[in-house]
Amino acid sequence: MNCRIILAVCFLLIPAFGVIGAAVANLAGTVVINLMRAVEVWAIMHTHAYDSGYFKPVMAGTAAALITGLADRFVAVSTGPGNFMLLASVLLLIFIGAIFALGIDKQDRTVMLLLRGRLVRNGTA
């Protein structure tokens, strides 16, 4: 089903937009399939497929992308790999800061503690 949706949208978007059209078609196919799955979960199990915890990374990523885009536009240090590394670092730091600012769930804390324990056991932390 996903392949059919992506192919249909590709036929519409690629001639007009090229590679960007292909990327948008893939995104549209993924969104449609995820929405169909969420509706299916609701219809069969009468429960939500997603909880509010799924919105935190979306909000943090949006904030990080917007701030990094503004930094690139208004505080252009250089071009090339150095600029890319700087902007990638800014994006990562803002994303992590936003995740912590929005709060860490109990499940996320458990995963972080397990990961830390595994790293300490292997001697990498």
Image: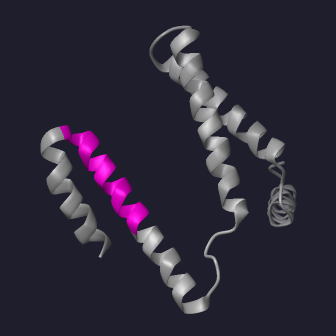
At x 29%, y 54%, the residue is: 25
Q: How many marks?
A: 0
Foreground of the two, 60 or 84: 60
Q: Is residue 16 left or right of residue 76?
A: left
Q: Which residues are magenta?
A: 17-32
User: What percent of the width, then of the height, locates residue 71?
Assistant: 59, 18
Which quadrant is home to the N terminus? bottom left
Quadrant position of residue 65: top right
At x 67%, y 43%, the residue is: 60
Q: Is residue 16 left or right of residue 59?
A: left
User: What percent of the width, then of the height, locates residue 98?
Assistant: 75, 40
Q: Is residue 29 magenta?
A: yes
Q: Is residue 108 left or right of residue 24?
A: right
User: What percent of the width, then of the height, locates residue 78?
Assistant: 51, 8
Quadrant position of residue 32: bottom left
Q: Is residue 42 magenta?
A: no
Q: Which color scheme does this rendered protein use?
A: one colour
Q: Is residue 19 left or right of residue 35?
A: left
124 versus 62 height, above or below: below
40 versus 20 height, above or below: below
15 versus 123 height, above or below: above
At x 46%, y 69%, the residue is: 35
